[in-house]
Image (spheres, rainbow, N blue to C red):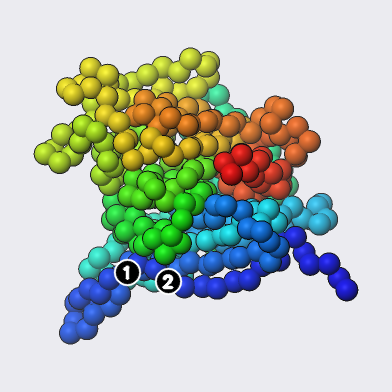
Amino acid sequence: MESIPADAHTREVFYVGGEYVDDGTVNETVYGQVYVEHLVPVHKPLQKYPIVFIPGSSRTSIDFLTTPSIPTSSPPPKSWSSHFLSLSHELYLIDPPFRGRSPWHPPTHLSPSSQSQSQPYLTFSAAPLQKAWTTPPFSTQWPDVNPPAGKGSPAFDHVMKSTHPQLASLAEEQSVAQKSLSALLDKIGKPVIILAHSMGCKIAWLLADARPGLVKAIVAVEPAGPAFQMRGMGGLRREMTAFGLTEVRLGFEPPVGEKGERLGRRLVKPEEEGLLECWLQDEEQEGGVRELVNLKGVEVLVVTGEGSPHRGYDWGTVEFLRQAGVEGVEHLVLEGAVMEGRGGGGNGHMMMLERNRGGIGEVIGEWVGRRV
């Protein structure tokens, strides 16, 4: 009899959250529900903490389930879901509100943002990232050959065909996601580890704030940031992030935003040469530095790729969290000895799809394993 694969599992799907709203006619529709895949390893006993996966901007849970083919690799490296199933973690993979299998809704509530074909590829592939760094790095782990190919190449097409529209209002998306995914944590009923990517990390911060007793730790893979003023492929975004990390109110103490108060901020130069200036709270603001009281006991790992634009500014997100009283924050840059024997460094923003994704899964898995 053949042995059972290490990542063998059972699967169920369900929806959480959502509320009935007027659809503009005489009817109602359900608004804000979230699609969830629940994967349970066959091999027992299960690990103590389930893992909730939250994808980034315009992405769905497919990024953790399937990956671009790598012609030179046989067998191909595991997806991150397969890796954590093989470690006996129960998994919950979600499509954020209004995306993928989480339904779109009446136009009275929504306005999709547009995204050109070049934008995802510049962000995710091995293209030079001049606008995000003072000295451009190059990611070297993207599955396409160098120089990076465009339309018609397997990895490019994989990303483009699995990219979804996203709300223009980040605050609307974050608010609905916080409410619906809080319902998911209530349904699970025990502490979880959240593994979030990019914009998905904003939802992770909000979930830990709403349900601090149900979030043991957060693995923030290249979190959207840095604090106050996010960076994109075009450089700094014009609008300031009202609550530092999110567009939706977080539980600061003393409170912020209840009577129009804003977080005081100051621009800080990094200690390491070649990194970018980032905003932190101003220690001299009235009432002093605000603390994220509901996140203080949550352990956080911020993961940064060596060849990603985030290498220049993830330090700012880390320091913002530490300054706000989050006690267990670690910053892991995937370079040097960390990736020795695991496919090397040189990762870009979409590291869960890159050639050495299996090695990165091992590194993250080891950190998660120490939380038990």
Q: Helix or strand or loop: what does disc 1 sit on? A: loop
Is residue 168 visible to us here? no
Amino acid type shown at disc 1: Gly
- The picture places residue 56, in percent across and down from the top left corner, at 47, 51
Compute the Cα span from label 2 to label 1: 9 Å
- Residue drawn at point x = 29 percent, y = 54 percent: 175
Amino acid type shown at disc 2: Tyr
User: 92 or 271, which lies in front?
Assistant: 92
- The picture places residue 364, in percent across and down from the top left corner, at 62, 42
Task: Residue lying at the far bottom in this picture: please name it.
Answer: 26
- Residue drawn at point x = 32 percent, y = 59 percent: 179
Q: Quadrant of the N terminus?
A: bottom right
Is residue 207 visible to us here? yes
Task: Residue lying at the far front in this picture: please name it.
Answer: 45
User: Does 70 sit above or below residue 291?
Assistant: below
The quarter holding residue 19 reads bottom left
Q: Which residue is mark 1?
A: 18
User: 71 or 251, which lies in front?
Assistant: 251
The quarter holding residue 281 reads top left
- Residue drawn at point x = 22 percent, y = 83 percent: 27
Relative to 189, is 303 on the left or the right? right
- Residue drawn at point x = 39 percent, y = 71 percent: 103
Whether label 2 touches label 1, CB < 8 Å: yes
| Mark sitting on residue 15 | 2
Q: Helix or strand or loop: what does disc 2 sit on? A: strand
- The picture places residue 243, in percent across and down from the top left corner, at 28, 38
User: Does 216 sit above or below residue 293?
Assistant: below
Q: Residues within 10 Å of mark 2 (few under 14, many from 20)?
A: some
User: 301 or 371, which lies in front?
Assistant: 371
